[in-house]
Amino acid sequence: MSKIEKAKGWKHSKPGLWLSIGTSAFGAISIVKDVRHAREDNDTLKLINALVGAAALVTGTALLVRELKRLGDDDVLLG
């Protein structure tokens, strides 16, 4: 297996999924800041943009959690 194939497989491993979820948490901090600034500026378009970004972040995180659960189904200790 080449290094590229290993790297692609790592993305769908448990550590890779946890790293992606952690990265999403940092994205949430940015979205909160965007919402706060949009409210301060009373800018509806910026607020909508931040809320759409939040929806995408939630959806992406839900997909990562689902994939993590699928990987966990093979683990006898996880039940």
Image (tube, rainbow, N blue to C red):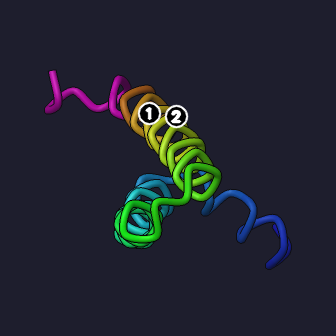
Looking at the image, do the residues carrying marks 2 and 1 touch, with CB atoms under 8 Å apart?
Answer: yes
Q: Is residue 16 above or below residue 13?
A: below
Disc ID at residue 59: 2
Say how many tags the image has.
2
Q: Secondary structure at mark 1?
A: helix
**63, 79: nearer the viewer:** 63
Residue at image coords 51%, 38%: 55
Report if residue 78 lies within the magenta region. Answer: yes
Query: Left or right: 22 with respect to 12?
Result: left
Query: Which corner quadrant holds the C terminus?
Result: top left
Residue assigned mark 1: 62
Query: Which corner quadrant holds the N terminus?
Result: bottom right
Report if residue 17 lies within the magenta region. Answer: no
Q: Amino acid at mark 2?
A: Thr
Q: Amino acid at mark 1?
A: Ala
Residue 52 is situated, as x and y percent measured from the top left of the image, at: 59, 42
Residue most extreme to the front: 42
Marks 2 and 1 sit apart, C-alpha to C-alpha, by 5 Å
Query: Left or right: 63 with respect to 79?
Result: right
Residue 15 is situated, as x and y percent measured from the top left of the image, at: 41, 63
| Neighbour tally class for label 2: few under 14, some 14-19, many 20 plus, Cα within 10 Å | few
Query: Left or right: 34 with respect to 48?
Result: left
Residue at image coords 55%, 59%: 43
Residue at image coords 35%, 66%: 36
> Which region of the structure is painted magenta?
72-79
